[in-house]
Image: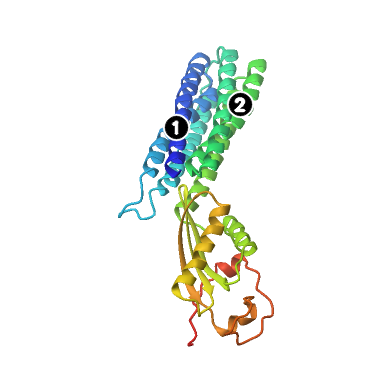
């Protein structure tokens, strides 16, 4: 199933790259025909689409490789690296666009055949929107950070194209040449902001920043499915490497369970998670033994070793399950 999902991601990205190349060629033709720096902004961003498209194909190909001795957590991290490079290239394209636009303010050029250029740019924008939708849906379904980031970029390209087309129509009607540079400066700024957002998000993934939204969701699921022998959970860690999740946690169970029984409780925990998440998940569950002070929160019935009466369970929260602490077994 994992291999099939990865192959689907790779096929989707190859299709996106092929269409992106056609869009780029179309925008180059539009710029050549019109000599509009506004259309040049679209063409430059399309260069980024093509370059990052090929980079994403490579990164997904690498992420398909199985875990090995040198990469015990797999190769999924390369997708975050690919998305970070994409963000940087988008940011750089925005700077180049603004530079060219400011230069054109002082050295204006004649705009020609703007109607043809507007049509080509609008058609490319629509195609980018459809590609972006395709990329994001596939990325979310198959857990690909690179596909989601690429899809968001294509959508931002579409939204900027809408504004660009409106500006070009105004330029076409008014014949005010400096509007071309103003349009390019505005959308160059939008492109820079888009690149910054992608860089910020993907850098967090590279730095293994905890995703507390997922941790909170997981905590609620575990609490709703809590078993009688699950006294407490702590030291929960959740990391995402490409399309794989890595979950580490300490599960506290009654101290008198033997190794086989304790291991069975760990298996139950994994089953609950797998029933709610269909992603590829690696587990490390460490079993801890309870101690007398936990009796008040332990709802296990007919416990022959209870030393304090049960009062009420502490509802599992993100703060509780992620708390870093050690549990020592009592002497029996």
Q: Is residue 212 shown above or below 288? A: above
Q: Nearer the viewer, mark 1 or mark 2?
A: 1
Q: Where 40 falls versus 225 (above or below)?
A: above
**What percent of the width, then of the height, locates residue 244?**
46, 50
Report helix, strand or loop for mark 2: helix
- Element class at badge 1: helix
- Name the foreground residue: 266 vs 180: 266
Query: Contact, CB < 8 Å: mark 1 with mark 2?
Result: no
- The residue beneath circle 2 is 164
Quarter occupied by residue 187: top right
- In depth, the one of 185 and 249 nearer the eye is 249
Q: In the drawing, what numbered circle is on residue 11?
A: 1
| Residue 224 location (% of width, % of height) | 65, 62
- Asked if residue 182 shows in the view, the reply is no
Give the residue displayed 52% in from the left and 33% down from the top: 98
Q: Quadrant of residue 225?
A: bottom right
The correct choice, above or below, for 215 with respect to 65 in the image is below
Q: CA distance from mark 1 to mark 2?
A: 31 Å
Residue under the image location 63 percent in, 61 percent down? 220
Q: Position of residue 109 (x, y in %)?
A: 52, 18
User: Which one is in front, 88 or 258?
Assistant: 258
Which residue lies most toward the left here?
69
Q: Position of residue 223 (x, y in %)?
A: 63, 64
Q: Nearer the viewer, residue 300 or 15?
A: 300
The colour style of the image is: rainbow
**Position of 257 relative to 148 (above/below):** below
How dense is the environment of label 1, judged by Cα within 10 Å: few (below 14), some, or many (20 and up)?
A: few
Mark sitting earlier along the chain (1/2): 1
User: What is the residue that sits farthest to the top in this orientation?
Assistant: 113
Marking on residue 137: none
């Amino acid at each position: 199933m994992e291999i099939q999902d990865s192959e689907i991601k790779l096929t989707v990205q190859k299709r996106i790259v092929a269409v992106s190349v056609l869009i780029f060629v179309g925008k180059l033709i539009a710029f050549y025909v019109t000599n509009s720096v506004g259309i040049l902004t679209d063409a430059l961003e399309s260069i980024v689409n093509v370059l990052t498209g090929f980079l994403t194909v490579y990164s997904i190909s690498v992420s398909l490789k199985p875990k090995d001795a040198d990469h015990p957590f797999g190769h999924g991290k390369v997708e975050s690296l690919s998305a970070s490079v994409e963000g940087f290239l988008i940011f750089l394209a925005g700077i180049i666009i603004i530079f060219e636009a400011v230069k054109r303010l002082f050295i204006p050029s004649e705009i020609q055949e703007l109607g043809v250029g507007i049509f080509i740019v609008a058609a490319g924008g629509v195609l980018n929107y459809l590609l972006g939708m395709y990329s994001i849906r596939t990325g979310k379904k198959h857990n690909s950070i690179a596909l989601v980031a690429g899809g968001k970029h294509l959508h931002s390209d579409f939204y900027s194209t809408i504004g660009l087309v409106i500006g070009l129509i105004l330029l076409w009607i008014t014949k005010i040449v400096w509007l071309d540079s103003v349009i390019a400066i505005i959308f160059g700024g939008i492109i820079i902001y888009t690149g910054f957002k992608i860089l910020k998000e993907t850098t967090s993934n590279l730095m293994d920043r905890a995703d507390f939204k997922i941790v909170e969701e997981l905590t609620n699921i575990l609490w709703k499915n809590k078993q009688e022998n699950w006294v407490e959970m702590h030291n929960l860690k959740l990391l995402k490497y490409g399309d794989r999740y890595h979950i580490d946690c300490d599960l506290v169970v009654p101290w008198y369970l033997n190794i086989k029984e304790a291991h069975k409780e760990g298996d139950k925990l994994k089953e609950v998670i797998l029933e709610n998440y269909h992603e590829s998940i690696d587990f490390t569950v460490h079993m801890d033994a309870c101690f007398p002070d936990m009796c008040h929160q332990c709802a296990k019935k007919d416990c022959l070793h209870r030393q304090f009466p049960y009062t009420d369970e502490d509802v599992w929260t993100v703060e509780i399950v992620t708390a870093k602490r050690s549990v020592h077994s009592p002497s029996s």
